């Protein structure tokens, strides 16, 4: 056999082998690799959930302590204060004073308290306030209960908690009825 005949025999076989290798490669890329990626992502999610479960188990005594140390009873939560039964305040300084008093009574310090006047239009009935508070978690709870009794409070849009050592910093966006 000369070289030309040998090449003619090997050429179809080589094409067949290359086609089979290509199909194997496509199968690996299209089937096995995505499956491995999905299972890896699921394993990461499982590990995250396991960590959160362990964290909750470790923090459950702290939760019991917080519940036991809470100083508001159910009847106090439903009471409305007489000064809050009057009509909604007509200016932003009166609303700010309500928030300042509630924060001071709760043991929180106010870092900033700013109304968003740009969102107030002629037809708008609500005014958002952005505030930053500093204190502990029980103080935040007491503050939220106090402002929850305000009849001109529309809703609380954002509560963001940032940890700074033992004390925490809170960012709140609160909407109130205005006019």
Image: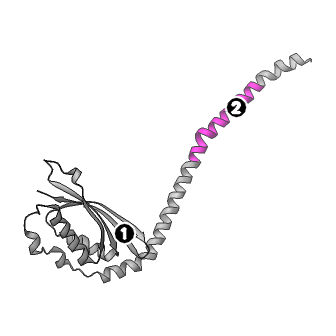
Which residue: 20% across, 77% down? 74
Which residue: 20% across, 66% down? 96
Q: Nearer the viewer, residue 175 or 91?
A: 91
Dot label at residue 20: 2
Dot label at residue 118: none
Q: Is residue 160 visible?
A: yes
- The structure's colour scheme is one colour
Q: Is residue 166 left or right of residue 154?
A: right
Span of residues in magenta: 14-35
Count of marks, rendered view: 2
The tag earlier along the polypeptide, 1 or 2, is: 2
Whole-Å distance between the Cαs marked 1 and 2? 63 Å
- Residue 39 location in percent, x, y? 55, 52
Q: Quadrant of residue 126?
A: bottom left
- Residue 103 location in percent, x, y? 25, 73
Q: Main secondary structure of the magenta part?
A: helix
Dot label at residue 169: 1
Which residue: 34% across, 79% down? 66
Q: Is residue 34 left or right of residue 151?
A: right
Q: Is residue 18 left or right of residue 51?
A: right
Q: Dot 2, crowdedness within 10 Å: few (<14), some or many (≥20)?
A: few
Give the SS element for disc 2: helix
* Quadrant (top left/top right/bottom left/bottom right) for the C terminus: bottom left
Q: Quadrant of residue 100?
A: bottom left
117 over 135 or under it: above or below? above
Q: Dot 1, crowdedness within 10 Å: few (<14), some or many (≥20)?
A: many
């Amino acid at each position: 056999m000369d070289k030309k005949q040998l090449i003619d025999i090997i050429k179809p076989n080589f094409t067949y082998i290359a086609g089979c290798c290509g199909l194997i490669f496509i199968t690996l890329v299209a089937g096995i690799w995505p499956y491995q990626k999905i299972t890896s992502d699921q394993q990461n999610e499982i590990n995250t959930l396991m960590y959160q479960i362990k964290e909750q188990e470790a923090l459950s005594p702290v939760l019991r302590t917080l519940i036991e140390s809470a100083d508001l009873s159910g009847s106090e939560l439903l009471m409305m204060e007489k000064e809050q039964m009057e009509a909604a305040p007509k200016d932003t300084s009166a609303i700010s004073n309500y928030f300042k008093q509630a924060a001071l009574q709760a043991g929180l310090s106010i870092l900033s308290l700013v109304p968003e006047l740009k969102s107030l239009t002629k037809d708008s009935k609500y005014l958002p306030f952005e505030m930053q508070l500093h204190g502990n978690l029980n103080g935040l709870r007491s503050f939220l209960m106090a402002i929850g009794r305000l009849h001109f409070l529309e809703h609380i849009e954002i509560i963001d908690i940032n940890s700074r050592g033992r004390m925490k910093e809170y960012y709140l966006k609160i909407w109130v009825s205005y006019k």
